[in-house]
Amino acid sequence: MAMNERPIPEAALRDENSVEMLRVWIAERKIHCSIKIGMYRESMDIDEAIAWGTILADATRHIAKALQAGYGEAEEISVAKIRAKFSEELDEPTSDAQGEFVTSQPD
């Protein structure tokens, strides 16, 4: 079966120390995630939740830039819409986050 995966960024291919932190799939009509949790806390003594806040904010800005490039919507408008929906979804989720925390890939 052919997967509809996004390409790996060139910088990640060049950098032997690159780390994939988050992969998000829509499958079986739900969101499924693979997340690298613990890297900041375990190797840099940085609060993991704060580090993920930065990652999600950076991802938001990348999404806004892509929406501007692809559809002409101003970055600041996209960021405002994403921020509003993010807060709304955290306060009143439209679905439960289900699943389990797996620490490694199966063989």
Image (cartoon, rainbow, N blue to C red):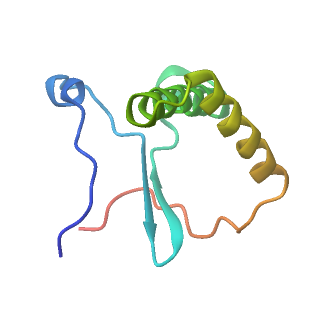
Residue at the spot 71% in from the left edge and 44% down from the top edge = 86
- Name the image quarter holding residue 97: bottom right
Instruction: List the single residue furthest toward the front.
Output: 72
Number of numbered tags placed on the structure image: 0
Instruction: Give the vertical position of 15 relative to 70 (above or below).
Output: above
Residue 60, by quadrant, is top right
Q: Residue reaching furthest left?
A: 14
Q: Is residue 67 above or below residue 46?
A: below
23 left or right, relative to 5:
right
Q: Position of residue 34 (x, y in %)?
A: 44, 55
Tell me the residue at 44%/37% (across/down). Answer: 71
Q: Is residue 102 left or right of residue 105?
A: right
Residue 64 picture location, percent across and down: 52, 30
At x 66%, y 34%, the residue is: 49
Task: Work out whether residue 55 or residue 59 is closer to the camera in this orientation and state it.
Answer: 59
Q: Quadrant of the N terminus?
A: bottom left
Q: Residue at x 16, y 31 (%)?
A: 13
Task: Say which quarter of the image contains residue 20.
Answer: top left
Residue 66: image x %, image y %?
A: 42, 32
- Relative to 39, is 86 above or below? below
Left or right, 71 with respect to 92, comes to: left
User: Which quadrant: the C terminus?
Assistant: bottom left
Percent x, y for residue 94? 74, 65
